[in-house]
Amino acid sequence: MIVEAQVRDYGFSPAQQDEIWRRRREGQSFSLIGRALGAPMQNARRFVHQSGGVRLTPQQRSERHLSGSEREEISRGIAAGELARQLAKRLGRSPSTVSREIARNGGRDRYRAASADDAAYARGRRPKQAKLAQRPALRALVEAKLALCWSPDQIAGWLRRQFPGGTARQISHEAIYLSLYDPVAARQSTAASLSACGQPGPCAARRSPVGLPGGASSAAWCPSPPAPPRSKTGRSPAIGRATS
């Protein structure tokens, strides 16, 4: 039996979780969300970041695919000696669909409904190639901006303005977050060295200066720059002083 990956609630009720995602869609900061819910800001941030900043939805199967109950019918039909064509007619499916189902799951002698259903579920969850891995030019643009410590929100907004109507050069901020946070991001959408730059640092709650893409409401993405070196006297060296 395959179990859906669990998301940690960090003490938030289902109603509070809905509220967190609603406020994030509106662009509210984690500090504001924490105050509104009466919870630590860090808990709200960890709750959102654990899924790469994207709300996970349960996997749903298409009606085109065989259901668990249909696989049970196939298993019982095989035990009763029915042919694939007879089973298909009873289920309202194509004979080729039933034949493939039986063949890929051990044949008539080894077919088991439960294991066949688990295998189908696992195939549906296989990692898909990320958009950044498919489009090298887009990946180069995103990596360049990450190297400048732009946030995913800023990058996505900049791409929309630079390439209006060109979906090949656009990507959502959620997809960038997934490339940075998703452990399956052995998708290798972005270079590991730049992923380190993409992780929120100690100043993640600090506001970016007005003028950067995303405006003053976007969270800063990189640690603060190091302080200037000090002289032996303990004072910072003068900046811009003429030398003899």
Image (spheres, helix red, strand yellow):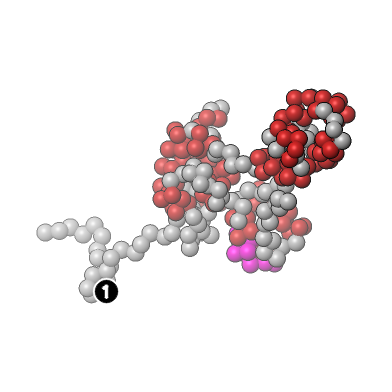
Please, what is the dominant secondary structure of the magenta stretch? helix
Q: Is residue 199 visible?
A: yes
Image spot of residue 27 (x, y percent): 62, 50
Residue at 72% from the left image edge and 35% from the top image edge? 107
* Magenta stretch bounds: 38-45
Image spot of residue 65 (x, y percent): 75, 34
Residue 190 counted in the magenta span? no
> Quadrant of residue 30 in the image?
bottom right
Q: Is residue 138 above or below residue 211?
A: above
| In-image side of 184 versus 94 (left or right) | left
Question: Which is more toward the observer, 231 or 171?
Answer: 171
Farthest-out residue, bottom:
233
Residue 42 counted in the magenta span? yes
Image spot of residue 117 (x, y percent): 74, 42
| In-image side of 108 versus 130 (left or right) | right
The residue singled out by tag 1 in the image is 234
Q: Is residue 121 above or below residue 10?
A: above
Residue at 59% from the left image edge and 45% from the top image edge? 174
Residue at 35% from the left image edge and 62% from the top image edge? 226
Q: Which amino acid type is shown beneath numbered disc 1?
A: Gly
Q: Quadrant of the C terminus?
A: bottom left
